[in-house]
Amino acid sequence: MEKFTTLTGVAAPMDLINIDTDMVIPKQYLTTIERTGLGRGLFHEMRYNKDGSDNPDFVLNKPAYKNASILVAGDNFGCGSSREHAPWALLDYGIKCVISTSFADIFYNNCFKNGILPIRLPREDVEKLLEDAERGANATITIDLETQTITGPDGGEIKFELDEFKKHCLFNGLDDVGLTMEKEDKIAGYEDSRKASEPWLFG
């Protein structure tokens, strides 16, 4: 998993409440277990017209936000079914951070396991960032995971809270497999001792 240290990018405003995982990536894209290629289906129902053309009113289709890497959203982002395809689709599109007042627990935890930083903030801070995001591509936001700060286009800083273990994993690019492989020497030592003491188990 790619490390998350700092991120400077355009923030797209999506001030909608209860954006569920089916809105993030609808069910027709769930037949794959590949993590790549899902970006094309991100926010499918809002992003495309019925004929498949781009909906010009959708925020990510507007020129200023086509390369957005940060999403500033309304309350309760990622609710609904517990599909890991949702963070896969966000990351494949290029969204590496989602900021909201609240997240569904499963989506929140899935983000960390896939290299996305979800940031919970009080409503007044989210509203300030939404105002900043409305400026489009001319106003970028910088997120520093080590110092847990968000720096707005005018230089103002917002601090955010984060569980230390989740921060450690994201900062070092450790998903569940990566965490296990940190104990590779101990695992190998245990297997060697079992082979020596109970060789019949290993043929």
Image (cartoon, grey):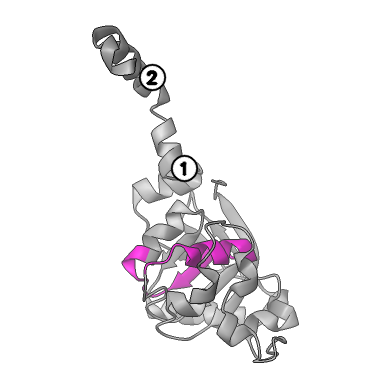
Q: Amino acid at mark 2?
A: Ala
**Residue 94 visible, this orientation:** no
Depth check: 83 or 131 in front? 83
Q: Quadrant of residue 77?
A: bottom left
Q: CA distance from mark 2 to mark 1?
A: 20 Å
Structural crowding at the residue carrying mark 2, measured as other residues with C-alpha within 10 Å and reported as few (<14), some (14–19) or many (≥20): few
Depth check: 168 or 104 in front? 104
Q: Amino acid at mark 1?
A: Leu
Q: Position of residue 79 (x, y in %)?
A: 37, 75
Q: Position of residue 29 (x, y in %)?
A: 55, 71
Q: Which residue is mark 2?
A: 188
Q: Quadrant of residue 66?
A: bottom right
- Magenta stretch holds residue 115: no
- Magenta stretch holds residue 92: yes
Q: Please report the residue visible at 38 percent of the width from the left and 19 percent of the height from the top.
A: 188
Q: Earlier in the sequence, mark 2 or mark 1?
A: 1
32 w.r.t. 166: above or below: below
Seen in the image, is 61 located left or right of residue 97? right
52 w.r.t. 196: above or below: below
Q: Which residues are magenta?
A: 82-106
Depth check: 118 or 61 in front? 61
Q: Which residue is mark 1?
A: 174
Q: Position of residue 191 (x, y in %)?
A: 33, 18
